[in-house]
Image (tube, helix red, strand yellow):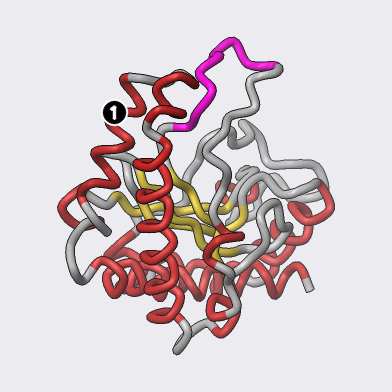
């Protein structure tokens, strides 16, 4: 990915208004096309271990840069990042991969984010019954090379109803999402080998996604 893409996002952060954006629409278009090329290269590199990624339409995977400000106190009209959902449709109730591009805050990750109640219960049941398999995935050396553990944001304080209070997998049953992420410094996201590096991160994540999606089938 070109460093100019990050520079566009930096400038957008300082000039988050329609007048500046419309005047510099050519910079946005160039940056967007650059990100699409990166996504295409990543999906190509991932196809050997996850055929679903190979089906990704890079353009459709990219989230809109326009913010929905109707119910937000923040009225900035544009996001200051590019985000893409790979391997699943946006808003899908299955585990997939996510690429976030933002100066100083880029990351590659994925999993299942804030699923609906029925899907959440299925994943929790899978973790409770097949706890050893789940732990073998998140304690695997390749997984731990990139991920410290599952994100615990918004987790419950108590084990949810329907599960034993002494369930040995209790801490994971409290989770509302099953997601991980790996930070990507600016120099890594713009490096020539960025697609291959991101593919390695997604490869480490793939067993977790498979475990989650098995629970949902």
Residue at 65% from the left image edge and 27% from the top image edge = 68
Measuring from the top left, give residue 10's x and y in whole percent.
Answer: 28, 31
Residue drawn at x 21%, y 57% is 190
Residue ID at (39%, 22%): 20
171 to 194, vertically: above or below: above
Q: Position of residue 193 (x, y in %)?
A: 21, 71
Residue furthest toward the bottom? 48
The quarter of the rendered structure image containing the N terminus is bottom left
Q: Mark 1 points at which residue?
A: 11
User: Which residue sits at x=78%, y=56%?
Assistant: 119
Query: From the viewer's perspective, is residue 68 above or below residue 173?
Result: above
Q: Residue 115 placed where, x, y %?
A: 72, 49
Instruction: Decide: is 152 above or below 79.
Output: below
The location of residue 201, given as percent across then percent down, is 35, 67
Left or right of 192? Residue 74 is right
* Quarter of the image that includes the C terminus: bottom right
Which SS does the magenta portion mostly show? Answer: loop
The magenta stretch is 71-79
Which is more toward the observer, 155 or 179?
179
Instruction: Indicate whether residue 77 is drawn in magenta.
Output: yes
């Amino acid at each position: 990915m070109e460093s100019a893409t990050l520079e566009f996002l930096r400038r957008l952060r300082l000039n988050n208004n329609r007048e500046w954006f419309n005047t510099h629409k050519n910079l946005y278009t160039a940056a967007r096309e650059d990100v699409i090329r990166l996504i295409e290269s990543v999906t190509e590199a991932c196809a050997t271990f996850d055929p679903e990624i190979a089906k990704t339409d890079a353009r459709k995977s990219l989230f809109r840069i326009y913010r929905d400000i109707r119910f937000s106190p923040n009225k900035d009209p544009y996001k200051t990042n590019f985000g893409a959902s790979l391997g699943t449709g946006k808003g899908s109730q299955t585990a997939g991969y996510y690429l976030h591009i933002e100066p100083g805050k880029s990351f590659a990750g994925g999993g299942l984010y804030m699923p609906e109640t029925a899907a959440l219960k299925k994943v929790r049941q899978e973790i409770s019954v097949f706890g050893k398999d789940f732990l073998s995935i998140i304690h695997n050396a390749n997984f731990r090379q990139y991920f410290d553990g599952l994100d615990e944001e918004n987790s419950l304080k108590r084990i949810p109803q329907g599960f034993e209070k002494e369930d040995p997998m209790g801490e994971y049953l409290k989770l509302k999402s099953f997601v991980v992420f790996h930070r990507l410094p600016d120099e890594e996201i713009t490096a020539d080998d960025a697609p291959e590096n991101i593919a390695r991160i997604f490869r480490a994540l793939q067993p977790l996604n498979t475990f989650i999606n098995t629970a949902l089938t």
